[in-house]
Image (tube, rainbow, N blue to C red):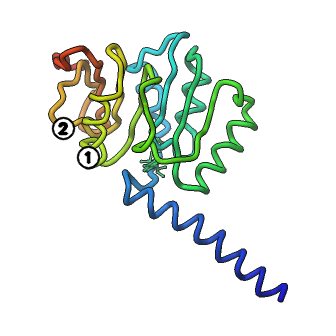
Amino acid sequence: MLTTLLYIGLLCVILLVFGTAAYAGFRASPWLPVFKKDIQRIVTLAGINERDVVYDLGSGDGRILIALANNTKARLVVGYEISFLLYFWSKVRVWFRGFSKRIEVRYGDFLNRDLGQADVLFCFLTPKAMKKLGLKFQHELHPGTTVISYSFPIPGWHAVAKDHPDERHIPIYKYIIDESMQSVTIEKH
Ligand SMILES: C[S@@+](CC[C@H](N)C(=O)[O-])C[C@H]1O[C@@H](n2cnc3c(N)ncnc32)[C@H](O)[C@@H]1O
């Protein structure tokens, strides 16, 4: 009886870990962390100040959350993560690094959450997810909100800045929401 219960428990854990990771890949992107060497480029391009609430949509192992809390004066850093193992691991990392007051890791699907509270959003997701998010952002984000997208642009949007020193680097796009959603492209390098 005990062995059966143990097997059922183990099966549930395996389903939770692998099932939610597979679901993440299907919903918006599988887990692939940003290169550590690019984190400072992201932080610099975002231009975060002490009033800002910053979101990472699909926060993975929490590396961007911790870098944002560590290297900026952001008031609050929020990560949404749907893969259970990554959610749990990033919570532990945040706690160990002593950032529990400034970083909130939330379990859930950011596609079903209202993102209107964010002043700055960071995304590293698939082109398909960026297309879906473009429409969501237009409805929910307030004018002045900054969106930073690592690697993939938002289809049909004009970036106000693009950090792409050369072909060996991954491009990073910056968008700012305005009333009319009209922005100009300025190549940073
Ligand atoms: C490419 S990884 C980026 C991780 C992290 N932002 C980074 O840059 O290191 C995308 C992350 O989004 C998560 N994810 C995918 N779809 C999601 C959804 N709908 N809601 C919440 N998280 C999601 C995945 O589990 C994965 O951790």
Above or below, 82 against 120 in this view is: below
| x then y, percent, for residue 23 | 44, 61
Above or below, 139 against 45 in this view is: below
Please state the total of marks drawn on the protein image. Answer: 2
Q: Quadrant of the N terminus?
A: bottom right
Residue at 50%, 15% in the rendered image: 52
The circle drawn on residue 155 is: 2
Answer left or right for 144 relative to 50.
left
Give the class, few, some or many, for how many residues have Cα within 10 Å of label 1's Cα (few <14, many ≥20). some
| x then y, percent, for residue 141 | 35, 24
**Numbered disc 2: secondary structure:** loop
Where on the picture, by quarter, is residue 173?
top left
Answer left or right for 170 relative to 42.
left
Where on the picture, by quarter, is residue 94?
top right
Residue at 70%, 80% in the rendered image: 8
Q: Nearer the viewer, residue 48 or 118?
A: 118
Above or below, 4 against 63 in this view is: below
| x then y, percent, for residue 68 | 55, 25
> What amino acid type should be assigned to the residue bearing mark 2?
Pro
Task: Identify residue for label 1.
Answer: 127
Residue at 22%, 24% in the rendered image: 159
> Is mark 2 in CB contact (under 8 Å) with mark 1?
yes
* Cα distance between the residues tagged 2 and 1: 8 Å
| x then y, percent, for residue 69 | 60, 24
